[in-house]
Image (cartoon, helix red, strand yellow):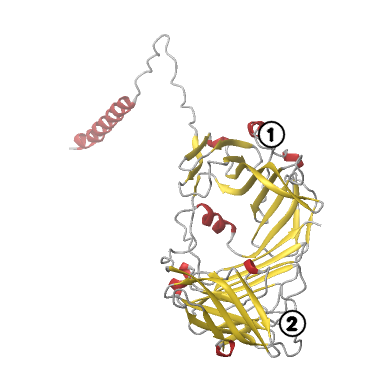
């Protein structure tokens, strides 16, 4: 019994060693066979070019390639030209390169060239010359792989058709009180900008259009003024709104229906009513020129189709008054627009939807830059802004011998102003009137205090999936400042 017990472990150990040797042998690799004589190793695959930018030019794009040449030039973030191509409506352009040759961000520049007839002054004489206009716009900070679609993106929904035009009628407004404080002054202060050459005839509009006649007369009696305006369109089944900003009576309005075909219409100023409520615009400072405009809309559909009434438009009145803005309960949405030109700078404000609440005008921002050219342009201002547009220009068309202009603008933020370089030689050869890159000088900047952020601005320009229809509460506020 003891012999059998001592033998069993030895047998088990022998079997275990044999099994390990068997497993080890099974794992040994077969010897490598030498390669056939004359064969070479497989080469590594070459990297393939990839699409880094795509431009689709929709057939509805506003570019008219019949009389205008159009190009797109792409720069890397170091200012080197990657590629350039011409484009026509309906084309799709793909820009390709090795991925390692393209920076993560690129700058896309759109270039258009057309010949034109321009006017200029020689002393006090107006002359014309045959020349050319070259326009360039650069968009920096574009992500590699982006796809733009150039198209006509409407900001308004389609509206119903214009009513049938029955002809023209003459509108007479009687019994307008003379100014008591300054009787010799004409009391009406508002007029459309398109009709500033004559006397102020107030603001007349339908749901779709401002309306003004082909001419008119103003007559005065001791106490009253009579206004006669000729050649107003008679739109069938249409309600007209007339507003008059009187020097002493303030802002009043009257709705009336179009007259019968072939008839004229006389209304009495005594029937004009006060608006349901008012807000008062700040006193407009002395300036070269300004426009203040407010349009009222009866509902959101009216607002988004731009079928509203002109409650007020005032141009260039500087008598120290606070201009009243009139609101009616029937209006749910408004558009308020103000633009003022001081010569060396311009201020613009627009609000869509709510009633405006403008209590003061911002101060003109300070502006400084260190050099004139595009590359290395160093811009600073004390204003907080969300984006800006810098304008550069070459020769100005001021004579028959110098009738060619080159304009280059750059859309950017404070952080992404681009590095750029001269256009490809091919373009300077094809368009010899292009001003050389190093001769283009800084002219002005538009500083957006309120508006779309840069990325949203790009989507509004080139993204078909973006909602381009105007939105309630949108505000645009900017200064355009000319270099001193």
Q: Is residue 188 visible?
A: no
In screen coordinates, is 98 left or right of 292?
A: left
Observer-nearest residue: 293 or 80?
Answer: 293
Q: Is residue 413 visible?
A: yes
Q: Is residue 268 above or below residue 361?
A: below
Furthest-front residue in view? Answer: 262
Separation (CA) of disc 2 from disc 1: 56 Å
Q: Position of residue 410 (x, y in %)?
A: 66, 50
Q: Position of residue 22 (x, y in %)?
A: 28, 26
Q: Is residue 351 above or below residue 113?
A: below
Q: Is residue 26 above or below residue 129?
A: above
Observer-nearest residue: 90 or 16?
Answer: 90
- Quadrant position of the C terminus in the picture: bottom right
Q: Secondary structure at mark 2?
A: loop
Observer-nearest residue: 342 or 104?
Answer: 342
Mark nearer the N terminus (2 vs 1) = 2
Q: Position of residue 92 (x, y in %)?
A: 46, 40
- Quadrant position of the N terminus in the picture: top left
Where is mark 2, residue-wise? Answer: 185
Residue 432's label in the rendered image is 1
Residue 288's label in the rendered image is none
Give neighbour class at mark 2: few <14, some 14-19, many 20+ (Cα, 10 Å). few
In screen coordinates, is 5 left or right of 92?
A: left
**Residue 35 picture quarter:** top left
Residue, x 44% and y 64% (percent of image)? 157
Residue, x 49% and y 79% (percent of image)? 332
**Residue 15 picture quarter:** top left
């Amino acid at each position: 019994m003891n012999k059998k017990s001592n033998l069993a472990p030895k047998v088990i150990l022998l079997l275990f060693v044999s099994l390990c040797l068997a497993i080890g042998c099974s794992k040994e690799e077969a010897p490598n066979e030498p390669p056939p004589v004359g064969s070479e190793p497989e080469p590594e695959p070459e990297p393939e070019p990839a699409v880094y930018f795509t431009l689709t030019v929709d057939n509805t794009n506003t570019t008219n390639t019949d009389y205008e040449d159009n190009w797109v030039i792409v720069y890397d973030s170091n200012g080197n030209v990657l590629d350039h191509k011409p484009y026509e409506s309906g084309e799709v352009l793909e820009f390709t390169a090795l991925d390692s040759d393209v920076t993560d961000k690129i700058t896309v520049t759109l270039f258009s060239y057309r010949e034109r007839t321009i006017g200029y002054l020689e002393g006090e004489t107006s002359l014309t010359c045959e020349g050319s206009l070259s326009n360039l716009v650069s968009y920096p900070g574009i992500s590699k792989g982006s796809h733009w679609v150039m198209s006509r993106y409407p900001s308004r929904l389609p509206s119903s058709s214009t009513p049938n035009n029955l002809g023209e009628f003459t509108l007479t407004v009687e019994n307008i009180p003379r100014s008591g404080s300054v009787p010799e002054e004409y009391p009406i202060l508002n007029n459309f900008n398109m009709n500033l050459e004559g006397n102020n005839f107030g603001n007349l509009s339908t749901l779709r259009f401002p309306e003004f006649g082909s001419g008119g007369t103003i007559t005065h009696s001791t106490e009253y003024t009579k206004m006669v305006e000729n050649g107003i369109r008679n739109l069938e089944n249409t309600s007209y709104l007339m507003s008059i900003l009187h020097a002493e009576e303030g802002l009043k309005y009257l709705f009336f229906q179009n007259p019968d075909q072939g008839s004229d219409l006389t209304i009495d100023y005594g029937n004009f009513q006060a608006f349901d409520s008012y807000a008062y615009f700040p006193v407009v400072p002395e300036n070269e020129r300004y426009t203040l405009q407010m349009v009222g809309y009866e509902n959101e559909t009216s607002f988004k189709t731009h079928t509203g009434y002109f409650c007020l438009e005032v141009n260039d009145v500087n008598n120290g008054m606070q201009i009243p803005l009139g609101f009616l309960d029937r209006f749910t949405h408004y558009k308020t627009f103000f633009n003022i030109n001081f010569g060396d700078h311009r201020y613009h404000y627009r609000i869509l939807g709510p009633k405006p609440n403008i209590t003061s005008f911002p101060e003109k921002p300070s502006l400084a830059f260190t050099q004139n050219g595009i590359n290395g342009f160093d811009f600073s201002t004390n204003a907080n802004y969300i984006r800006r547009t810098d304008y550069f220009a070459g020769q100005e068309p001021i004579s028959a011998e110098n009738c060619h202009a080159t304009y280059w603008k750059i859309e950017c933020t404070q952080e992404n102003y681009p590095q750029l370089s001269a256009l490809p030689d091919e373009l300077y050869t094809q368009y010899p009137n292009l001003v050389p890159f190093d001769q283009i000088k800084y002219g002005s900047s538009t500083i957006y205090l309120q508006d779309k952020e840069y990325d949203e601005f790009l989507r509004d320009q080139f993204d078909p999936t973006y909602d381009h229809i105007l939105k309630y509460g949108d505000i645009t506020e900017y200064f355009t400042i000319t270099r001193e």
